[in-house]
Image (cartoon, rainbow, N blue to C red):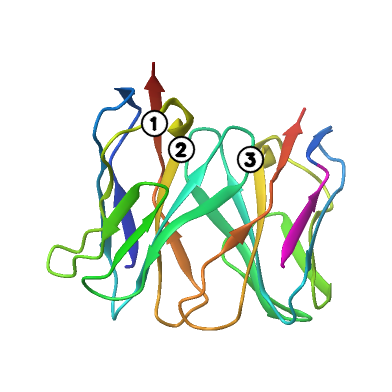
């Protein structure tokens, strides 16, 4: 069966520090991969999605970036964190076919201080 | 543009009460529709889905029917339990496949 791993589960970082969040999927090939952010008490904001290695689509311009160095690995990065980057970051995957749903990881709670 | 609008929360119900969480959508073409549930501190879990008009998705006593004429996908459960306390998200997937739009979530608390 397929599983998705996200780490770390929680992270506290000072303003101006770098960020690297990692997500890996097991048990499937060539998945579509997604990064969402969920601010406190709000819905989900799509940050990036990827349909293949090295292919990244950015939905919201900001100081975050994403990379997909391997088929089942998706990394969210920042060179310098802002206070407004605090939130709950969710990685998700889906089979690359019509009507297939998203499957989410357990999320990373990021607090920028 | 494409979007999902769901009922504002929070919703508080007594155990065994009937639940309805409204969801309406705006989309071109024929989207697929989903309900996800998020328990505290966790990611979202797929609860149910429907891929075409008049389909009914169901799981764990929850149901939702894809109504194209009213562009709605309301979530219902006949008798809620304390363990159903969570945040519920309605979502649509465009028929291109890659893009999903989520509602803002509805918090449900069930009290004994």
Callout 3: residue from which chain?
Answer: B
Queried whether the magenta region covers residue A82, the answer comes back as no
Query: How far from the left and from the top, in percent, is residue B11?
Result: 32, 28
Gap in angstroms between the C-alphas marked 1 and 2:
6 Å
State if disc 3 and disc 1 touch (CB < 8 Å): no
Callout 2: residue from which chain?
Answer: B
Q: Do labels 1 and 3 share a chain?
A: yes
Residue at image position (78%, 55%) is A5
Of callouts 1 and 2, the N-terminal one: 2
Can you tell which quarter of the image residue B109 is in? Answer: top left
User: Mark 3 highlights which residue?
Assistant: B42
Of callouts 1 and 3, the N-terminal one: 3
Residue at image position (77%, 72%) is A27
Taking depth in this image into account, of B26 and B97 the one nearest to the observer is B97
Where's the C terminus of chain A, which quadrant? top right
Q: Residue furthest top?
A: B112
State if disc 2 and disc 1 touch (CB < 8 Å): yes
Callout 1: residue from which chain?
Answer: B
Gap in angstroms between the C-alphas marked 3 and 2:
11 Å
Taking depth in this image into account, of A60 and A55 the one nearest to the observer is A55
Residue at image position (70%, 34%) is A83
Of callouts 3 and 2, the N-terminal one: 3
Q: Tell me: B98 left or right of B10.
A: right
Query: How far from the left and from the top, in percent, is residue B6?
Result: 30, 47
Find the magenta span and give its range.
Answer: A1-8
Taking depth in this image into account, of A46 and A96 the one nearest to the observer is A96
Q: Residue B87 carries which label?
A: 2
User: Mark 1 highlights which residue?
Assistant: B108
């Amino acid at each position: 069966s397929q599983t998705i791993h996200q780490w770390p589960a929680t992270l506290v970082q000072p303003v101006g520090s770098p960020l690297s969040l990692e997500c890996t999927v097991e048990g499937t090939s060539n998945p579509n991969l997604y990064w969402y952010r969920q601010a406190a008490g709000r819905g989900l904001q799509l940050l990036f999605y990827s349909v293949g290695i090295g292919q990244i689509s950015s939905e919201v311009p900001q100081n975050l970036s994403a990379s997909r160095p391997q088929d089942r690995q998706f990394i969210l990065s920042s060179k310098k964190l802002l206070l407004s980057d605090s939130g709950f970051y969710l990685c998700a995957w889906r089979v690359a076919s019509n009507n297939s749903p998203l499957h989410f990881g357990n999320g990373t709670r990021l607090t920028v201080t | 543009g494409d979007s999902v609008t769901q009922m504002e929360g929070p919703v508080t119900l007594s155990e065994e009460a009937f639940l309805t969480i409204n969801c309406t959508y705006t989309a071109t073409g024929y989207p697929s529709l989903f309900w996800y549930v998020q328990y505290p501190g966790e990611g979202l879990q797929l609860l149910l889905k429907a891929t075409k008009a008049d389909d009914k998705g169901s799981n764990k006593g929850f149901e939702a029917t894809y109504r194209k004429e009213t562009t709605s996908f309301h979530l219902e459960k006949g008798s809620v339990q304390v363990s159903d306390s969570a945040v519920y998200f309605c979502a649509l997937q465009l028929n291109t496949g890659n893009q999903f739009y989520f509602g803002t979530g509805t918090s449900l608390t069930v009290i004994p």
